[in-house]
Amino acid sequence: MDDHQAAGRPAVRTDEAGGYWIFTDHAVILDGLQRPDLWSNSVIVPTEPDPPYRWIPIMLDPPEHTKWRHLLGSYFSPGRTKAMKAGQHRLAVELIEGLRARGDCDFVSDFAQVFPSTIFLEIMGMPREQLGEFMQWEHMILHENNDSDPTGSVRLAGMQAVQTYFAGLVAERRANPDPRAQDVVSAAISWEIDGEPVTDADVLNCLLLLFMAGLDTVAGQSSYALLHLATHPADRARIVAEPALIPHAVEELLRAYPIVQTARKATRDAQFHGCPIRKGDMAAFPLSAAGRDEQAYPDAKQVDLDRPTIRHLSFGGGPHRCLGSHLARQELAVLLQEWHRLIPDYELAEVPLEHGGGVWGLESLPLRWAV
């Protein structure tokens, strides 16, 4: 590496897990995400070059990936998302009213994990009363500590539990089809690509990915948003006084607190922004680094609710940009609006614990307020 790279721009190299690149600049990360010809998405984390699983469609490359995106796109389209908005407002109010008189809560378990997950379960056609069990499986897959699960057996057991559940649900829908049903699982029994039925294995791998994304990402993102607002009273006051600011605030909070840290695998030898890439090289493209890049955003470490234009990478970039970004944005805006309408003044009760990995999040977020 030259001196510029040695200083950490635009990449550093770590010796962990046999070594991999870590790209640090917004422009370089965006370029990498937009080049599936060079950087394959067949991996999830940079420490696992040959994973024993295949999540669909995120671990597929074009053109196969493109066909799956087309198949799934309608379930998360702007129009379908907007049609769910009124119901999301009602659900948010129901949950917040159930907490308000208490004067305190763990925002993560009492709201952040319940609100978007309930919406997701409806989209998928899954029973709300099993949410606790679903969240346990999700934690096994995404948040089991590497020290306590060095072989990945807990993560694989969680994936197996989810796929076994979906196999039973798919079999049930096939045995008792409902032509009026509009949920994803009911539709999955008749999915076709290129005129051919999708295999059961591929259906289950796709439902597994949707399960993980639906139960985890908005929960983590909204927890960081409330952590910020609980510890920055001036920003919270702006949200309360100017609810029309909320959609813009969502974008700035997404930029400042990106929770997904994605990875890629090199498909061939190449020079990539001065780095000598070899076929099979692993690389991390941390969206957290992109969101805090001072070259892309002046005063990047500061949340600025008046930041003029916010083009962030917190939903990724290129062909793998988050399929559910419209839904996530709407859910975040709804929950910020209703929470601050009903509980405008609150504070952090204790410092929360965070977890790292491919998707960052808070283990808990204790809040309190006057009643």
Image: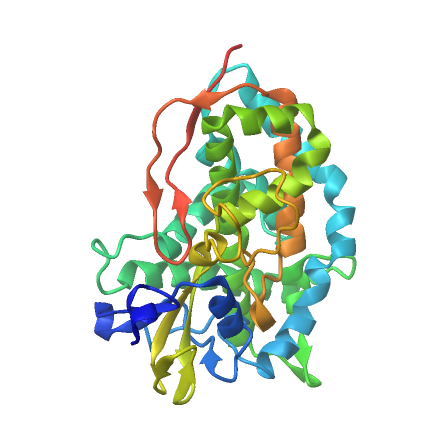
Percent of width and height locating residue 359: 42, 54
The residue nearer to you, when weighing 147 against 224, is 224
Give percent across and percent down for residue 145.
27, 52
Horizontal placement of 161 versus 67: left or right?
left
Q: As rendered, which of 199 and 82 lies closer to the eye?
A: 82
Position above or below: 65 against 257: below
The answer to which of 353 and 54 lies nearer the viewer is 353
Assign the N terminus to one quadrant of the image: bottom left
Q: What residue appears at the point 55 percent right and 72 percent down from the top-left corner? A: 57
Rendered residue at 34%/86% (across/down): 278
Res. 244 visible in picture: yes
Q: Position of residue 173 (x, y in %)?
A: 64, 62
Q: Is residue 232 above or below residue 58?
A: above
Residue in view at x 58 percent, y 44 percent: 252
How is this picture coloured?
Answer: rainbow
Please indicate whether residue 255 sits to the left or right of residue 138 in the image.
right
Q: Quadrant of residue 71?
A: bottom right
Left or right of 46, for residue 75: right
Q: How many marks?
A: 0
Residue 86 lies left or right of residue 364; in this view the side is right
Residue 260 makes an appearance in the image: no
Q: In the image as oriented, which residue stretches furthest toward the front?
A: 3
Position of residue 316 relative to residue 299, above or below, is: below
The part of the image, by quadrant, that contains residue 93 is top right
Residue at the extreme top:
371
Picture coordinates of residue 88, whole percent (x, y): 69, 39
